[in-house]
């Protein structure tokens, strides 16, 4: 009886899919007008917009849109690269990915401000991301206190950059290593002794900051553990030298392309 007296079930009217999908507006990107599918695709998408509750902002062609279209919804900001979103590509690509260098200095334009930093167009294939901690040596609480969209800035590509990845940028010039003048160290005979200071000691040797004969140029070189002791093979680098110690070294090899220099503390006659 209870079953028979229940009111008949009324089907719930279907709800538009777009209403709760989080889409606030729609921009239709169409192929070029020369494409055969242009009339069909434009009519279909116009019908979809009219049937749904989504405002149709307008139509864009790939030419008008350029290559600045990022994978994001209108009204939503793109998260930094660590969130997994694909980085934005720029419309102008004066620089190829292979031309970008770590700690290279570039002039760029701020294209977007985010809570975690800012996106900067440096003229490469992809925009770079400038983290909030790399904007200034001072404490930065709000990115907009230091930057605004459209502002031109000087930035450096931070360490860890790989070709094809989104460049991580910095504006902190104090954290950028000064380029080494390797020409001041090339051509020095291996028997010539130079003054240096131990910068760090590791298990396999020590890094020594060497002063060139001109007295101005300085560069870090590596003294392998086999080249540390003048008398016998050193088993423990920490027992031979310590950080901050002044030493005399000779140059064995200079690799300017890879920013490397091999040093020795052995007297030259012991190698013959």
Image: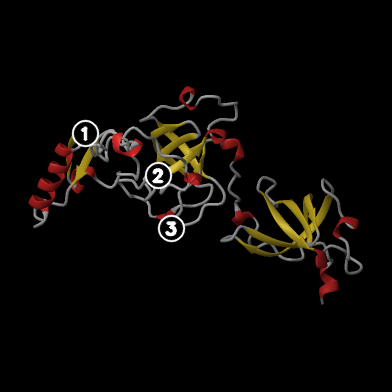
User: Which mark, by number, is residue 98?
Assistant: 3
Residue designated by label 1: 53
Q: Looking at the image, do the residues carrying marks 3 and 2 touch, with CB atoms under 8 Å apart?
A: no
Using the image, tell me which numbered label, if any, was put on residue 155: none
- Left or right: 31 with respect to 101? left
Q: Quadrant of the C terminus?
A: bottom right
Specify how the rendered protein is coloured.
secondary structure
Badge 3 element: helix
Q: Of the residues tagged 2 and 1, which is closer to the observer?
A: 1
Q: CA distance from mark 2 to mark 1?
A: 34 Å
- Identify which residue is drawn at 38% across, 55% down: 96
Q: Tell me whether circle 2 and circle 1 mark residues in contact (CB < 8 Å).
A: no
Question: Which quadrant of the structure image shows residue 12?
Answer: top left
Residue neighbourhood size for the residue with mark 2, other residues' Cα within 10 Å, grouped as few (<14), some (14–19), many (≥20): many
Rendering coords of residue 258 (x, y %) = 59, 60
Count all numbered tags in the image, as a single digit.
3
Q: Residues within 10 Å of mark 3 (few under 14, many from 20)?
A: few
> Can residue 208 be seen?
yes
> Circle 2 is placed at which residue position?
127
Using the numbered discs, state the Cα–Cα distance from disc 3 to disc 1 in whole angstroms: 46 Å
58 sits left or right of 258 in the view: left
- 215 with respect to 266 (left or right): left
Numbered disc 1: secondary structure: loop
- Of callouts 2 and 1, which one flags the residue occurring earlier in the amino acid sequence? 1
Quarter of the image with the N terminus in it: top left
- The residue sitting at the bottom extreme is 272
Q: Position of residue 21 (x, y in %)?
A: 32, 38
Q: Residue furthest top?
A: 145
At horizontal 55% and vertical 24% (from top left) the residue drawn is 141
SS class, disc 2? loop
N-term mark: 3 or 1: 1
**Left or right: 256 with respect to 89?**
right
């Amino acid at each position: 009886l209870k079953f028979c007296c229940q009111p008949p079930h009324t089907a719930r009217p279907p709800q538009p899919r777009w209403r709760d999908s989080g889409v606030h507006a729609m921009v239709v990107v169409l192929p070029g007008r020369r494409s055969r599918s242009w009339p069909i695709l434009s009519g279909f998408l116009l019908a979809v917009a009219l049937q749904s509750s989504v405002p149709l902002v307008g139509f864009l062609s790939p030419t008008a849109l350029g290559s600045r279209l990022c994978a994001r919804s209108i009204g939503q900001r793109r998260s930094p690269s660590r969130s997994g979103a694909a980085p934005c590509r720029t419309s102008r690509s004066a620089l190829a990915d292979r031309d970008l260098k770590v700690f290279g200095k570039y002039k760029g334009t701020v294209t977007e401000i985010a809570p975690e930093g800012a996106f900067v167009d440096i003229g490469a294939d992809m925009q770079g991301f400038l983290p909030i901690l790399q904007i200034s040596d001072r404490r930065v609480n709000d990115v907009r206190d230091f930057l605004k969209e459209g502002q031109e800035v000087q930035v450096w590509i931070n360490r860890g950059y790989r070709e094809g990845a989104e460049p991580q940028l910095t504006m902190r010039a104090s954290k950028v290593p000064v380029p080494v003048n390797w020409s001041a160290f090339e051509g020095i005979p291996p028997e010539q002794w130079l003054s240096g200071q131990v910068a760090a000691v590791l298990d396999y040797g020590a890094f020594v900051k060497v002063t060139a004969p001109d007295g101005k140029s300085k560069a870090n070189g590596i003294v392998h553990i086999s080249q540390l002791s003048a008398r016998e093979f050193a088993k423990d680098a920490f027992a031979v030298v310590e950080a901050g110690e002044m030493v005399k070294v000779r140059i064995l090899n200079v690799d300017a392309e890879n920013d490397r220099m091999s040093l020795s503390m052995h007297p030259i006659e012991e190698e013959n």
